[in-house]
Image: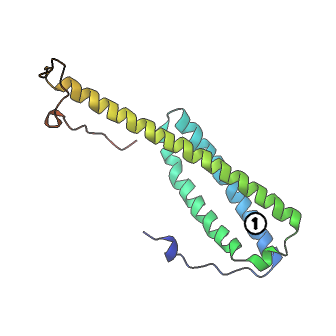
C-alpha cells in the first residue's frame, strides 16, 4: 500500500495554457465525482448498500486521478498566476462546492456506518439476553447475562 510520501511530486507546469487545460480536466473530474458521490449518497440513504458498494471502485479511481492533478496544479503557482482571474475564480468556486458535497457524502456514509453498527450491537445484545437464563440476584432483581453466556454473533460482511 502506498502512502502520500511514496507519491513523487509532480513537475510544475510552465504555461498558462497548460494550467487552463489541467483546470478543465479537473473540472471534468469533479463533475464525474459529483455524479458518482450523489448516486452513492442516494443509494445509501435508501438502504441499497450493495449497489452503493459497486460505485466505490470507480469513485476511488477518479479520486486518485483528481488528487494527482490537484497536486500538479498546486505545484504550478507561476503558471496559475497567468490564468485569467475570472477563470481562476470559477475554478475555486467549483472546487469549494465540490468539497462541500464531499463533506455531506462523508457524513451520510459515517451515519450509515454508525446506524448499522448500533443495529448489530442491539441484535447481539438481544440474542444474548434471550439466550441467558432468567434468574434473579440477591437483591430480587433480574441479573444481567454473564459475559460467558453471551454467544458470538456471526455477520457476513459481503453485501
Question: 80 or 51, which lies in front?
Answer: 80
Relative to 26, residue 144 above or below = above
From the image, tell me which residue sits under label 1: 23
Would residue 74 appear left or right of 4 to someone viewing this image? right
Question: 5 or 154, which lies in front?
Answer: 5
Would residue 40 appear left or right of 125 to someone viewing this image? right
Q: Position of residue 80 (x, y in %)?
A: 79, 73
Q: Label 1 crowding class (10 Å Cα cut-off): few <14, some 14-19, many 20+? A: many
Residue in the image at 73% along x and 79% along y: 13
Q: Quadrant of the C terminus?
A: top left
Residue in the image at 58% along x and 41% along y: 41
Relative to 129, residue 58 above or below = below
Q: Position of residue 152 (x, y in %)?
A: 21, 38
Q: Quadrant of the N terminus?
A: bottom left
Residue in the image at 82% along x and 58% along y: 90
Q: Element type at marker 1?
A: helix
Amino acid at each position: 500500500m502506498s502512502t502520500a510520501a511514496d507519491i513523487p511530486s509532480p513537475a510544475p507546469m510552465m504555461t498558462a495554457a497548460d494550467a487552463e487545460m489541467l483546470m478543465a480536466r479537473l473540472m471534468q473530474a469533479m463533475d464525474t465525482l459529483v455524479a458518482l458521490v450523489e448516486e452513492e449518497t442516494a443509494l445509501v440513504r435508501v438502504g441499497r448498500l450493495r449497489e452503493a458498494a459497486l460505485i466505490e471502485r470507480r469513485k476511488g479511481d477518479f479520486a486518485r486521478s483528481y488528487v494527482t492533478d490537484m497536486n500538479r496544479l498546486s505545484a504550478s503557482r507561476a503558471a496559475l498566476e497567468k490564468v485569467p482571474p475570472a477563470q481562476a475564480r470559477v475554478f475555486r468556486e467549483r472546487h469549494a462546492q465540490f468539497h462541500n458535497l464531499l463533506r455531506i457524502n462523508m457524513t451520510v456514509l459515517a451515519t450509515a456506518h454508525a446506524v448499522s453498527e448500533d443495529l448489530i450491537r442491539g441484535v447481539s445484545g438481544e440474542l444474548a439476553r434471550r439466550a441467558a437464563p432468567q434468574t434473579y440476584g440477591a437483591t430480587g432483581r433480574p441479573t444481567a447475562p454473564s459475559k460467558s453466556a453471551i454467544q458470538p454473533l456471526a455477520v457476513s460482511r459481503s453485501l
